Amino acid sequence: MTAADTTTRPLVIVEALLIRTTTAAAMIGVSPRTWRRLVSAGLVPEAIRFNKLKLYRVRDLVDWVDSGCPARGRTNKNARRAVTSAQAGGKWSPDHDSDHDLLHERRQATGRMGDAPSAGPAPAFR
């Protein structure tokens, strides 16, 4: 070994500018399957196509999280279900559906809960 071989080089750390789907999901803390549900619902930043790869800008993901994870502008029933599904551990149920909660609140406000006393026994159909 020569003196030139024993000198140490400075360590250079390179941060990725673009990451794959599995890495993006890991950064956010969800499974790749849940990430794909969020993508199809339009709730995460849009991916960049590079050849056949879908890549996400790290900067976009950080900005998205810093701004409270807003949807990309598309809100629909499936998008809300995807979010509640992710929050419920991947299992969607009507109890977690925001439409269900909204309907329940409206029924309570209007008094149409279906629990009003009836005027007598229900008629028998023959």
Image (cartoon, rainbow, N blue to C red):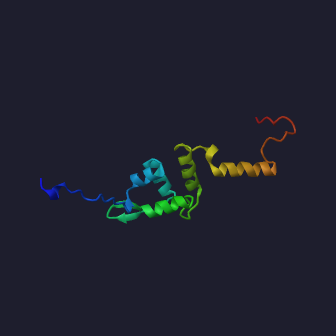
Classify residue 111 as left or right of residue 42.
right
Say above or below: 122 vs 80.
above
* Nearest to the observer: residue 125 or residue 107: 107
Name the residue rendered at 54%, 60% in the picture: 66
Can you give x and y, in whole percent of width and height, for residue 24 in the image? 43, 55
Quadrant holding the C terminus: top right
Name the residue rendered at 84%, 34% in the picture: 121
Say above or below: 97 vs 118.
below
Q: Residue lying farthest left?
A: 1
Can you give x and y, in whole percent of width and height, for residue 86 in the image? 53, 48
Name the residue rendered at 31%, 64% in the picture: 51
* Nearest to the observer: residue 10 or residue 70: 10
Picture quadrant of residue 11: bottom left
Name the residue rendered at 33%, 58% in the picture: 13
Can you give x and y, in whole percent of width and height, for residue 73 in the image? 56, 65
| Residue 42 can be seen in this image | no
Classify residue 113 as left or right of residue 54.
right
Can you give x and y, in whole percent of width and height, for residue 100 in the image? 66, 48
| Residue 60 can be seen in this image | yes
Q: Residue lying farthest right?
A: 119
Picture quadrant of residue 74: bottom right
Picture quadrant of residue 6: bottom left
Numbered circles on residues, count: 0
